[in-house]
Amino acid sequence: MMWIRRALRLACLVALLTGWVYPAAAGSSLDLSKAVIIIADPDKPVVAKAAVLLQEEIKKRTGITLAVTSAIPSKDTVIVLVTIGAPPAGLGEQPADLAVPDKPEGYAIWLDTTTRVAPAVCLVGHDKRGAIFAVGRLLRSLSMTPGSVTLDSRFRVASAPEYALRGHHVGYDNLNNTFDAWSIEQFEQYCSDLVVFGTNAIELTAPTDPAKKDSPHMKRTMWDMNIDMSRVAGSYGMDVWLFLPTLEKVEDPSIAAQELSKRAALFKALPCLDAVMAPGGDPGDTPLPALLPFLANVAKALRESHPKAGIWLSNQGFEPEKNAALFDYLNREQPDWLAGMVYGPWAKMSLRELRDRTPKNYPIRFYPDITHCVRSQYPVPEWDPAFGHTLGREPFNPRPEAMTRIHNLLMPMSIGSIPYSEGVNDDVNKILWSGLSWDSKTPPKQILQEYGRYFMGDALGDAAASGLADFERNWTGPLLTNKTVPETYAKWHKLEQAADTKSSSSNWRFQLALLRATYDEYVRRRLIEDTAREQKCMDALSKASEPGIAAALASARAALSAPDGDTQIAVMRARLVELGRAIFDSIGMQLDVAHYKALNPERGAVLEFLDTPLNNKNWLNAQFQAIADAPPAEALKRIGAIVKWESPGPGSYYDDLGNGQKQPHLVRQAPWADDPGGVAAPMEEFNDIKDYRLSWEDQAQTLFGTPLRMKYDGLDASAQYTLRVTYVGRFKSTMRLVANGKTEIHGPLKQPDPVAPVEFVVPKAVTSSGALELEWRLVEGRGCQVAEVWLLKE
């Protein structure tokens, strides 16, 4: 009877933890535990694969193996899988009010309870893909627990995809955080998971060197693995894309010939290949006069092996002159070797501009970055720096509301998408993106519910879905006052206690959620401690006097190095290390460099940052050494500057640009909801340079020549002001600073080295109206980046 008590406990837990309720059965449930799966189109391999998919996924969740046959038994409940035009004998007519959509990949599902002695669940696809997506919809709609599989007896649906292309990038290479450790069996499981949620394409990365292995985790060459990955994806009816940059110097005819031969051999080796994406940049920077004829020859070689395949070009990284030359070529030549254009990260224009400048006969594929949180196309807006410097670029990152907004804002300008990914940290976003691409009106809450139930089980699914949504709220607003973080941790901790051993020991999706919930709360608790330590340090410094400088520095150092008062921090740290090992054992995800051989810390290696200071400890200790060596008057001046760093006094202002909570004068030319990629508005940027002030490790930035702007109102019209600015950022750009659109504060200026604030006198006439507008204009580099700005009243 223990399982009954566990089920009751889980049901109560779901009710307590969340108000989310999966749609209740409208009628009685149909028992399918003894059903027979009927393949009415046995000569169609994808339909046969769909039947196997249904059989295997039901068995994994229930322990029940349904028989698969092509002959309909007279008395058994059946699940009939068929395409239009091939209904098996013995089934009734399709309901008059439930037509299979007349659109590729569409399907209809209904229950026939009147024609036969036993019920029939009818899955009718418009085509072979429609059949496999019907199976996916059925699997997401079944109630599956050990020893039981049922379906709401009134279930019926007709559906077809909104977007023709619904793919995901799954690269077997060392840049990603997981896939390079996988076997072909693990890849196939992931393919089937994606298919269940409506994915119809996979993009691979393959080298032109048959012997290449660029990761210590790889058990096979990249060439051989990609051949099998191509075959597996094709067996599910998925389109197979290949990400193939041009990194070689093909301006040299002999090199171009060699590389063309290598590509032709690769194309011939891949059993299934439908398209090749050729990024013009990121990576690659081949001059256009060499790139375009080379790609024309690549297209010819591609069609020799795969006649229907085509080349898709992205303009990532193209400067305005290169873009002008590209679009002039496309409009003038209308090349038939080009199948379409791709809009991806670091395309220095909006998707709307790309669509408008590209001839209409070339479709646009969207290539959004859904995997990264910083230094990316769609960073988390106004992310708390404590997360930016710990979770960093590739954490487990469910972002249902953000993904929905980005998808529905930009996808209508494309035929669909294959998002950029570097592993499974974005697994929830992949499912969200596929679900929204099937039907953009689907509430993200519904997709999360289906994700939770399908991947974590009926008992946990609804509470898990609520917990996944909470992760996005964990990242909203200042962490110190975010009440969702401890609540989310408590929710997942209770789910872990209620889950069976298998969920916590081998279900990697459940493990990733436990890791994130624990990590977020761990960082929050550490931030509380580190903030208190720095405040005590400032208190000690503020008491410094000429005879007591050494004592003040000693007290300040002691405050910064005080042990944690929260004993749970050490417990959580140990748990995170334990979960890191469990996740690596489950799927090979590399959560640190030393133990799991992540390529580098930003590639999902969140365990690398468990001890990262969340205050200015490193920078302060370096300052203390210089202060101790300075003459007393100079030492006191430096101490005063540190204590008043962010509080410059009455009538003066300080902005920590890049910190969403401390940049009140930053101008946003467009709200995030209208410009999530920061094409025409600023975004936050994070770097990790351990000896810098935290305020130097984040910046406000603008891209692609967009000016960075600040605005002040209510100034003293008669006062003299000085502007102090900290220039730092990975772009190391050269910028001009102009006030009120016309007065130059400084001309072209490179980032100082070493980094230190610089000051400029603001002419009194500039602030005589009581207002000031500042505009940084890009002279050279990828974009404008500014870390700190003081407007100081003298």
Image (cartoon, rainbow, N blue to C red):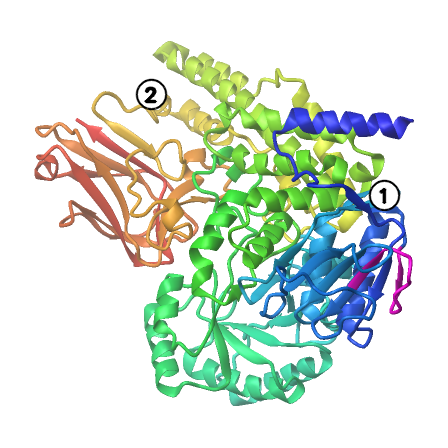
> In this rendering, does residue 55 appear at all?
yes
Q: Secondary structure at mark 2?
A: helix
Q: Which residues are magenta?
A: 66-80
- Dividing the picture into quadrants, the one containing residue 94 is bottom right
Tag 1 residue:
148
Which numbered tag is attached to residue 419? none
Name the N-terminal-most of marks 1 and 2.
Answer: 1
In the image, 351 versus 752, the foreground residue is: 351
Image quarter (top left, top right, bottom left or bottom right) of the N terminus: top right
Q: Main secondary structure of the magenta part?
A: loop
Question: Dot 1, crowdedness within 10 Å: few (<14), some or many (≥20)?
Answer: some
In the image, 588 versus 516, the foreground residue is: 516
Q: Is residue 76 located in the magenta-colored stretch of the structure?
A: yes
Classify 606 as above or below 349. above
- Residue type, numbered disc 1: Ser
Tag 2 residue:
640
Q: Is residue 119 located in the magenta-colored stretch of the structure?
A: no
Please indicate whether residue 398 sits to the left or right of residue 686 in the image.
right
